[in-house]
Image (cartoon, grey):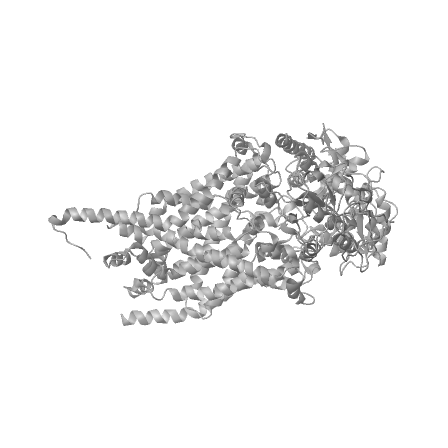
């Protein structure tokens, strides 16, 4: 008794009155008619046919069930529910998954309720300790190796394969962070989640008046600078008034500095970590020494905000107030870079290189994963699919706050103003260099290395320790943390 | 009011007295029953679990393969330079913060205890800083204390141009003290005020009629009767200053992602980071229990001194029984 | 005696302008940051900590206050009601049960009392972080997470801080009151209810206000126990005014803080009058 169902995908460009067929569940016997709904989607018409082999179509008011033949994922057949329903606990940020969106989903999918829990680390640990982790968790790329090592993630490959909405081919490169054969082999293999959006994170934003003040030309947006050139520019762009900083020369994501190092070292085929990630190697690696020294010098010359000379809020705001000349953030920053003060004065530049090799991956890849312990995987998948492939994803794409996770949605990125078009031009070029991934250490927390660095940086800047001692300290402390991590996971 | 008992009635006095003290015992336990039940059911178990955590390598996610490490976390605390450093900072901080705060709060309560018009408005204004959300307090004070764009440095720059004193990084303890005193005045003032209100008026008037001036009234009537309240504020103030966490955490540059400056690296911050940045729940919990012991010792010492300087009617009354 | 009284009254009159002057000076100093607070709530985000320093906003952004209610993405009144319910129930319950406990510790010389009181003090010292996750597990097993029951239970089981507060307060009552009542045949509970409690209005008001303020502003506990639909205003206000990337919009959040603090101020303003009035009648006057 074989049933076969081929897929039909109907997708129409952002307008009114598109229809979509929903839901996947296993129900070998009953076949029912597809209920259609109004949804806005994008174009890509790939029409295939639907064949219903047995039974008479019956009209069911609300629910839709479909017959699928699963050849690759036995889990899907294991416990066939009557319909997809359940209470899905989602841990996320309210501004990224709003109440309106939640209500819309629940209206479209009666039977599934979303229980929204605000993302909070303590709450997450507490829920895990109580044995009730959230079904869907907002997380970032560096957490994936850790979660994989602890076997906390649900393998979503089977769901992707049968989904109408999400297809593995359509995934942007950043989603590779959510794929891995093992915690130390991230990039390809079974997929455990996907990002909600992403950006090539190493691009630069320049504030034109700062350059004019310093008598410099704004760099050309087709040729990448080198990091050494950036340093020189920062020196010339920074403006001081006595001890006061009037204009910061440069800025970058300090709390992610180790990821920047990883990317730079990647140009030289080097890694921060040695011996299968069981230790960090700074003092023994001259390249790592050079890179970290670079950031130390930036801080000691007060060209960037540092522990002794902090920014009043964060460097993104410094830039929008017109007090920061050159800032390294990804495409996502473009949406906020223009404020009343900086409007029309911002230029996005390609990512700088250290050794001439262009690499511009994302270093966060914020997205979501499903808990291995989830009791309602089908319902959870519905939420996942909706959030990443339907209305919310489309809304995100048009906002300009990140590159969409699905390549088919790339056209939705804003490009009306001259500024947006300039940004898009640079972005399209950066895409070519965004296919690499950074391999994070499965034994460390997301911020451990950057944190240890910042703490010792303060001591170094105050002169309490030398730079070599700084590196040695960072090494010792990070290695301790790694060994603990190994101990915990083993 | 005394009762004269004839010898013949003595046995029944004893019976009455012992049934009286039995009734008092029952009454006592009835009165504290709500707290006691809650303590046993809702607090003891979490405490025990919390203590057990300090003997493991729990990291928030490894409940399935957790390991017992005995007292290793505790011995680590003694070897850890950062732990000792943070304890030192906390002692410095308490020594700086407590006297300033208590004295100012007391003075404010005295000022507000008078019969002036609109005192309700004044009291509310003085209480206001302590109810403003911590986050708002921090953001607003940053306007004043920021190194490059703050008002304080701008004012100083009028005299010495280009001044950029890092009130929130290198000298973070000073910045922290200013903010903590300002925002803590409210509750101290309220408690002191409640205590001052509890001093019977006729005692003050009697003293004045006897010829005492304001200072003597203050010294011989107000202060002695206020000692229970001062004791309360002192104990709670010490405890909370040792446990100070949220304010210095929020003052750290760019919020909580980056470590707070060394100057304000208090013990609780050290512990918080062990738990939430490094996921060392076991070690962090051990640090918390060690802090508990330290505070306990300090508090017990203060309690030891209670009978020497704290006035209590009930104690006096009991001695007379 | 007459001369003494006149001199006394004269001194009181003389002190008044001096008192006012000092009060006003101190008020100005203390309220300066509050003024900044209010001014910043009327600024645009780029005016926050800008250079050159601006004290007054260029254009007062009154719409910040409108945005507090409209752009948060949540129903203000719904969450305000949650906060109100929790704060009221917790405060009333805690104040009462803690008054009972404080009375017992202050007035009964009973075996075991001091040891139990040491536990109370010890509980004050234990940092809350120690018990957060274990307590969550306990409540989770009882299936009480995502409900308001934890607050009710905490209220019913009193608070060490407030037991301590009431103990200190009741310590200063003269023992004649109790003796007189006992001779009249009152049991301990009557003594508590009819004599001590009515005279403890200052402490009750203080305790209530502290409790209310704490629950109203508590951010961490609702984060741990409540889902987004049931959470309190404090959590919503702290996390809702963000740009799409999650960075806080400072000035709107400050405006939200103003709105959120107002009920506390009003409550305190009304309550502090009560503290004053409450002390008028008392058996202390013999």
Residue B288 shown left or right of residue A235 in the figure: left
The part of the image, by quadrant, that contains residue C195 is: bottom left
Residue C140 shown left or right of residue B207 in the figure: right
The part of the image, by quadrant, that contains residue A246 is: bottom right
Rendering coords of residue A29 (x, y %) = 72, 44
- Compare residues C235 and A5 and report the one nearer the observer: A5
Q: How many marks?
A: 0
The part of the image, by quadrant, that contains residue C275 is: bottom left
| B147 versus A297 height, above or below | below
- Compare residues A147 and B316 and report the one nearer the observer: A147
Q: Which residue shows up at 47% across the image and 59% down it?
A: C209
| A356 versus C24 height, above or below | above
Rendering coords of residue A430 (x, y %) = 84, 45
Q: Which residue shows up at 30% across the image and 62% down it?
A: C284
> Split into 4 quadrants, where in the image is the N terminus of chain A?
top right
| A200 versus B226 height, above or below | above
Rendering coords of residue B228 (x, y %) = 37, 52
View extreme (top): residue:
A275
Residue C226 shown left or right of residue A393 in the figure: left
Does the rendering let one see residue A442? yes
- Compare residues A341 and A309 and report the one nearer the observer: A341
Rendering coords of residue B173 (x, y %) = 56, 47
Does the rendering let one see residue B211? no
> Split into 4 quadrants, where in the image is the C terminus of chain A?
top right
């Amino acid at each position: 008794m074989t049933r076969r169902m081929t897929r039909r995908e109907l997708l129409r460009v952002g307008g009114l009155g598109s229809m979509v067929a929903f839901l996947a569940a296993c129900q070998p016997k009953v076949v029912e008619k597809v209920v259609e709904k109004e949804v806005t989607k994008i174009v890509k018409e790939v029409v295939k046919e639907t064949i219903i082999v047995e039974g008479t179509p019956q009209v069911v008011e609300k629910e839709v069930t479909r017959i699928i033949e699963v050849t690759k994922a036995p889990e899907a057949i294991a416990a066939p529910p009557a319909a997809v329903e359940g209470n899905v606990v989602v841990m996320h940020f309210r501004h990224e998954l709003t109440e309106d969106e939640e209500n819309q989903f629940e209206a479209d999918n009666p039977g599934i309720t979303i229980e929204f829990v605000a993302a909070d680390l303590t709450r997450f640990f507490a829920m895990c300790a109580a044995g009730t982790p959230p079904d869907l968790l907002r997380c970032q790329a560096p957490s994936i190796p850790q979660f994989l090592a602890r076997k906390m993630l649900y393998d979503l490959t089977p769901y992707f394969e049968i989904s109408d909405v999400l297809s593995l081919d359509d995934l942007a490169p950043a989603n590779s962070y959510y794929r891995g054969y093992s915690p130390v082999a991230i990039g390809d293999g079974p997929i455990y989640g996907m990002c909600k959006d992403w950006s090539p994170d190493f691009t630069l934003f320049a504030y034109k008046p700062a350059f004019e003040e310093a008598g410099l030309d704004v760099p050309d947006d087709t040729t990448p600078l080198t990091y050494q050139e950036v340093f020189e520019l920062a020196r010339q762009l920074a403006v001081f008034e006595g001890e006061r900083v009037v204009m910061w020369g440069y800025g970058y994501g300090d709390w992610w500095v180790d990821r920047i190092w990883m990317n730079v070292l990647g140009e030289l085929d080097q890694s921060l970590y040695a011996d299968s990630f069981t230790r960090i190697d700074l003092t023994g690696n001259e390249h790592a020494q050079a890179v970290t020294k670079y950031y130390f010098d930036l801080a000691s010359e007060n060209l960037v905000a540092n522990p002794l000379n902090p920014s009043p809020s964060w460097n993104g705001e410094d830039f929008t107030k017109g007090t920061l000349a050159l800032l390294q953030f990804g495409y996502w920053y473009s949406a906020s870079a223009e404020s009343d003060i900086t409007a029309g004065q911002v230029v996005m530049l390609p990512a700088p290189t250290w050794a001439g090799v262009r690499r511009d991956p994302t270093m966060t890849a914020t997205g979501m994963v499903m808990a291995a312990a989830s009791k309602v995987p089908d319902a959870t998948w519905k939420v996942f699919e909706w959030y990443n492939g339907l209305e919310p994803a489309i809304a995100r794409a048009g906002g300009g706050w990140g590159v969409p996770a699905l390549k088919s949605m790339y056209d939705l990125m804003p490009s009306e103003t001259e500024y947006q078009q300039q940004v898009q031009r640079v972005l399209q070029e950066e895409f070519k260099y965004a296919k690499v991934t950074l391999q994070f250490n499965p034994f460390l927390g997301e911020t451990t290395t950057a944190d240890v660095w910042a703490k010792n940086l303060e001591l170094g800047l105050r002169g309490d320790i030398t730079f070599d001692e700084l590196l040695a300290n960072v090494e010792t402390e990070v290695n301790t943390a790694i060994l603990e991590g190994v101990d915990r996971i083993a | 009011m005394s009762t004269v008992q004839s010898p013949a009635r003595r046995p029944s006095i004893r019976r009455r007295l012992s049934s009286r003290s039995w009734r008092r015992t029952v009454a006592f336990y009835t009165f504290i029953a709500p707290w006691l039940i809650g303590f046993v059911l809702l607090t003891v178990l979490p405490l025990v679990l919390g203590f057990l955590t300090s003997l493991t390598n729990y990291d928030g996610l490894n409940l399935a393969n957790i390991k017992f490490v005995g007292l290793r976390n505790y011995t680590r605390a003694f070897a850890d330079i950062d732990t000792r450093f943070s304890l030192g900072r906390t002692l410095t901080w308490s020594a700086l913060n407590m006297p300033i705060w208590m004295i100012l709060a007391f003075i404010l309560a005295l000022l507000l205890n008078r019969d002036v018009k609109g005192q309700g408005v004044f009291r509310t204004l003085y209480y206001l800083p302590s109810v403003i959300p911590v986050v708002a307090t921090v953001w607003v004070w940053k306007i004043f204390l920021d190194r490059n764009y703050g008002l304080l440095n701008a004012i100083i720059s009028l005299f010495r141009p280009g001044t950029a004193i890092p009130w929130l990084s290198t000298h973070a303890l000073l910045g922290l003290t200013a903010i903590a005193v300002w925002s803590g005045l409210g509750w101290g003032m309220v408690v002191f005020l409640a205590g001052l209100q509890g001093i019977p008026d006729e005692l003050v008037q009697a003293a004045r009629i006897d010829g005492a001036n304001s200072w003597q009234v203050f010294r011989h009537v107000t202060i002695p009767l206020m000692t229970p309240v001062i004791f309360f504020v002192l104990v709670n103030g010490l405890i909370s200053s040792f446990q100070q966490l949220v304010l210095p955490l929020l003052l750290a540059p760019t919020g909580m992602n980056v470590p707070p400056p060394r100057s304000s690296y208090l013990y609780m911050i050290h512990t918080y980071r062990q738990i939430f940045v490094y996921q060392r729940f076991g070690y962090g919990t051990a640090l918390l229990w060690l802090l508990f012991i330290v505070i306990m010792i300090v508090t017990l010492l203060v309690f030891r001194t209670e009978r020497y300087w704290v006035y209590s009617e009930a104690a006096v009354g009991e001695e007379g029984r | 005696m007459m001369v003494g009284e006149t001199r006394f009254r004269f001194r009181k009159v003389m002190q008044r302008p001096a008192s006012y002057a000092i009060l006003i000076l101190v008020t100005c100093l203390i309220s300066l940051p509050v003024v900044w607070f209010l001014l910043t709530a009327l600024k645009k985000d780029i005016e926050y900590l800008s250079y050159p320093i601006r004290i007054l906003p260029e254009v007062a952004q009154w719409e910040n206050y409108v945005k507090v209610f409209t752009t948060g993405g949540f129903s203000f009144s719904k969450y305000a009601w949650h906060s109100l319910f929790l704060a009221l129930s917790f405060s009333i319950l805690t104040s009462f049960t803690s008054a009972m406990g404080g009375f017992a510790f202050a007035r009964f010389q009973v075996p075991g009392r001091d040891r139990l009181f040491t536990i109370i003090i010890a509980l004050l010292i234990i940092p809350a972080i120690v018990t957060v996750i274990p307590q969550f597990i306990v409540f989770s097993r009882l299936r009480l997470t995502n409900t308001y029951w934890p607050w009710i239970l905490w209220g019913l089981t009193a608070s060490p801080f407030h037991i301590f507060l009431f103990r200190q307060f009741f310590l200063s009552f003269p023992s004649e009151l109790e003796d007189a009542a006992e001779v009249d045949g009152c049991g301990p509970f009557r003594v508590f209810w009819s004599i001590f409690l009515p005279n403890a209005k200052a402490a009750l008001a203080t305790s209530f206000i502290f409790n209310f303020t704490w629950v109203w502003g508590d951010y961490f506990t609702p984060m741990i126990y409540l889902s987004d639909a049931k959470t309190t205003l404090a959590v919503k206000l702290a996390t809702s005014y963000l740009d799409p990337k999650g960075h806080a919009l400072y000035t709107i959040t400050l405006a939200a803080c103003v709105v959120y603090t107002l009920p506390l101020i009003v409550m305190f303003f009304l309550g502090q009058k009560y503290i004053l009035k409450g002390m008028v009648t008392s058996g202390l006057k013999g």
